[in-house]
Image (cartoon, rainbow, N blue to C red):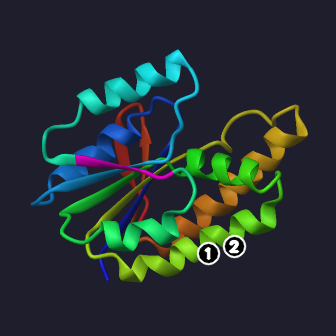
């Protein structure tokens, strides 16, 4: 079983940059697992900047929903995998399942079960969304609670967990 590392932090905390540096310390080709969809010009620019920041060692797998099916085979021959990001994946799953939490958690559990099949280290990036104010909309509260639950599950099964604040990583486990 390959090692997994969970990296969390707030928006623009440096978590993706830190995860990328950890992945790039691994030998061999690297796979960026993108969960984001591009639905507007601003998101397209964010994706372009992320891509420009990665060297030729990187290839990309775009998978907004079915990570459990795609990652085990995609990990073959890779030096490391960087999944960015868990919270976008959860957003995609939540809307795909009509804002029902149970099937989202079932998919997360299926994903966790596949971690033992990965042939390369996995770096998971996720937003810490529970440190701010309580959202005023029910869907915002539902998502905040879902992300917190999933972050706890992923951190628990990961070999290492990091919190990044202001570009500075703090090892949690």
Rendered location of residue 124, percent (x, y)? 42, 56
Numbered mark located on residue 106 in the image: 2
Residue 43, given in percent of the width and then of the height, sits at 50, 24
Q: Is residue 6 left or right of residue 156?
A: left
- Residue 30, position as x, y percentages in the image: 21, 54
The answer to whether residue 159 shows anywhere in this view is no
Assess whether residue 143 is covered by the magenta stretch: no
Give above or below for 93 relative to 18.
below
Picture quadrant where residue 80 is located: bottom left
- Label 1, label 2: how many angstroms apart (C-alpha)? 5 Å
Q: Residue at x 20, y 64 (%)?
A: 78
Query: Where 70 sits versus 38, above or below?
Result: below
Say which residue appears at 24% left-offset and 30% top-offset. Answer: 53
Left or right of residue 66: residue 121: left
Between residue 135 and residue 118, name the one nearer to us: 118
Question: In which quadrant will I find the C terminus?
Answer: bottom left
Q: Which residues are magenta?
A: 59-63
Instruction: Identify the residue at horizontal 34%, vertical 64% (top origin).
Output: 122
SS of the residue at dot 2? Answer: helix
Report the quarter where the N terminus lies: bottom left
Q: Residue beneath label 1, please?
A: 109
Question: Does the image show residue 47?
Answer: yes
Q: Position of residue 121 (x, y in %)?
A: 28, 67
């Amino acid at each position: 079983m390959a090692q997994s590392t969970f990296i969390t932090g707030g928006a623009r905390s440096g978590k993706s940059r830190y995860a990328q540096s950890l992945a790039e310390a691994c030998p061999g080709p690297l796979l960026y697992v993108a969960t984001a969809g591009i639905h507007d010009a601003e998101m397209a620019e964010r994706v372009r900047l992320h891509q420009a920041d990665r060297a030729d060692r990187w290839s990309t797998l775009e998978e907004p929903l079915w990570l459990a099916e795609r990652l085990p085979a995609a990990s073959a021959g890779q030096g490391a995998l960087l999944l960015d990001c868990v919270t976008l994946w959860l957003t995609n799953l939540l809307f795909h399942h009509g804002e029902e939490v149970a099937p989202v958690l079932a998919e997360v559990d299926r994903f966790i079960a596949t971690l033992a099949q990965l042939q390369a280290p996995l770096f998971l990036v996720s937003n810490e969304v529970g440190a701010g104010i309580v959202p005023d909309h029910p869907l915002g509260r539902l998502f905040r609670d879902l992300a917190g639950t999933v972050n706890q599950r992923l951190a628990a099964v990961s070999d290492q967990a990091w919190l990044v604040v202001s570009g500075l990583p703090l090892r949690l486990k």
